[in-house]
Image (cartoon, grey):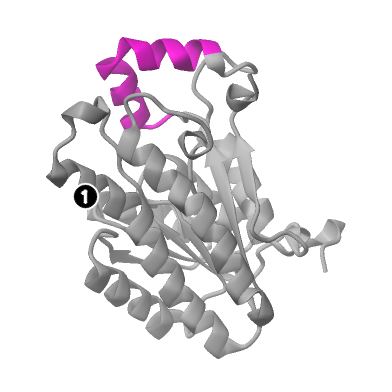
């Protein structure tokens, strides 16, 4: 039951995909600060190693594994490794994703498939496999999918990405409905454009996108910071959100309200 002392992940096994940088890295660190035992995955081994060293240096427990979320076999191998190491999964944070800006008329099939696989297919199979483990454990769990405000409103120059993220939002509702009987809560955090190498590159690539970031984030007039996205994720992962499932929490500084 959610109470004021439920804002914790103490001793929970928390899996974070795309943990090497940006929002994912901050989520992993914040989960550790809330008492979690961490499993982190990414394609970039060097970034994971520095994160693992940081967490273990502060007295935490952290395992790392190679993870390409566009490949189902890679997802399976990574999660099998998590279960072998910890014996369970309590929380999954589906953070990994990818995007490249272009006009819809200019995307080719290869890039379209990469974006959809990295943002929608990965969430389906990561969640499916984690839920199978949670169901077998028999004591519930939590999944938080990182979507985007681009999945809530129109998003020029982000056609495949916005379609995939909209799919994540609705697929999350279906997951929540199917898995509620097992005590598994599934929710979405849909961030605005948040400071990361990918976001900064996108702003550099497109003046229109850069201008939108500076005018449509009503609270900031700039990029959000990763910590501002991580805190709502930790909330939804914790028992403080015990009566919340199937919800899309838009964290956008007011972008989508006007």
Left or right of residue 196: residue 222: right
Magenta segment boundaries in residue numbering: 195-215
Q: Residue at position x 55%, y 16% from top?
A: 216
Could you tell me what secondary structure mostly forms the magenta stretch? helix
Name the element at disc 1.
helix
Specify whether residue 212 is in view.
Answer: yes
Q: Is residue 199 magenta?
A: yes
| For residue 156, above or below residue 133 | above
Q: Residue at position x 35%, y 80% from top?
A: 80
Q: Position of residue 54 (x, y in %)?
A: 43, 52
Q: Is residue 22 magenta?
A: no
Q: Name the residue that disc number 1 marks.
A: 113
Q: Residue at position x 37%, y 17% from top?
A: 209
Q: Residue at position x 18%, y 34% from top?
A: 107
Residue 256 placement: quadrant? top right
Left or right of residue 209: residue 187: right
């Amino acid at each position: 039951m959610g109470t004021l002392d439920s804002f914790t992940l103490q001793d929970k096994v928390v899996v974070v995909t795309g943990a090497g940088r940006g929002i994912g890295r901050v989520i992993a660190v914040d989960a550790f600060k809330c008492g979690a035992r961490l499993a982190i995955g990414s394609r970039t081994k060097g970034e994971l190693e520095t994160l693992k060293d940081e967490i273990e240096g502060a007295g935490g427990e952290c395992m790392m594994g190679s993870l390409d979320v566009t490949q189902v076999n890679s997802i399976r191998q990574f999660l099998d490794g998590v279960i072998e190491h910890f014996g369970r999964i309590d929380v999954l944070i589906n953070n990994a994703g990818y995007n490249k800006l272009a006009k819809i008329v200019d995307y080719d099939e290869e890039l379209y498939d990469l974006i959809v696989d990295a943002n929608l297919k990965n969430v389906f199979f990561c969640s499916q496999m984690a839920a199978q483990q949670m169901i077998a454990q028999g004591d519930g769990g939590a999944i938080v999918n990182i979507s985007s405000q681009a999945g809530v409103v129109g998003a020029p120059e982000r056609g495949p990405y916005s379609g995939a993220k909209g799919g994540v939002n609705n697929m999350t509702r279906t997951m929540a409905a199917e898995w509620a009987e097992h005590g598994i809560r599934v929710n979405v955090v849909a961030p605005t454009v948040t400071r990361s190498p990918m976001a900064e590159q996108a702003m550099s690539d497109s003046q229109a996108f850069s201008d939108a970031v500076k005018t449509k984030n009503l609270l900031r007039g700039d990029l959000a910071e990763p910590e501002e996205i991580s805190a709502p994720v930790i909330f939804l992962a914790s028992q403080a959100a015990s009566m919340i499932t199937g919800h899309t929490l838009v964290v956008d500084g007011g972008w989508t309200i006007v």
